[in-house]
Image: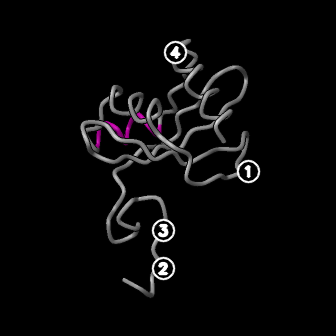
Amino acid sequence: MLDLLEKIRKYIKDEKIQWRGHILSRMIQRRIKVSDVLTCLQNGEIIEEYNDDYPYPSWLVLGYSNEKPFHIVCSIGEGYIWMITVYSPDGEQWSPDFKTRRNPNEV
């Protein structure tokens, strides 16, 4: 996983970033800044893998910007990191550390 995070951070440093329309509309809707997303990817950790995603496998990254948690889904392909979506994790759906999904029967 560490190699993958290093790869993600290198793409960001090299400005090899593709912003999907979906993430951009969600960022506007949720008032999330580009700097929040990039900060989270620089300090974040991969908490889920989606190996069957198309056209490239993707990952759910938990990171913090200004002490606020964010989940970012991204993938790597064609020499870029692809930004797919971002949101603030809901405490009812996620454990207190925002790394594990809660069982719906426990809520």
Q: Which residues are magenta?
A: 22-29
Q: Position of residue 23 (x, y in %)?
A: 44, 38
Vertical comparison of 2 with 14: above or below = below
- Pick the residue in front: 1 or 38: 1
Q: Amino acid at mark 3?
A: Arg
Q: Amino acid at mark 4?
A: Lys
Whole-number angstrom distance, CA of label 3 to CA of label 2: 7 Å
Rendered image: mark on residue 13: 4
Mark before the other along the chain sequence, 4 or 1: 4
Write down the residue under mark 3: 101
Vertical comparison of 11 with 33: above or below = above
Q: Which quarter of the figure has residue 90?
A: bottom left
Mark before the other along the chain sequence, 4 or 2: 4
Asked if marks 3 and 4 touch (Cβ < 8 Å), the reply is: no
Vertical comparison of 78 with 15: above or below = below
Q: Is residue 68 magenta?
A: no
Rendered image: mark on residue 51: 1
Asked if marks 4 and 1 touch (Cβ < 8 Å), the reply is: no
Q: 102 left or right of 49?
A: left
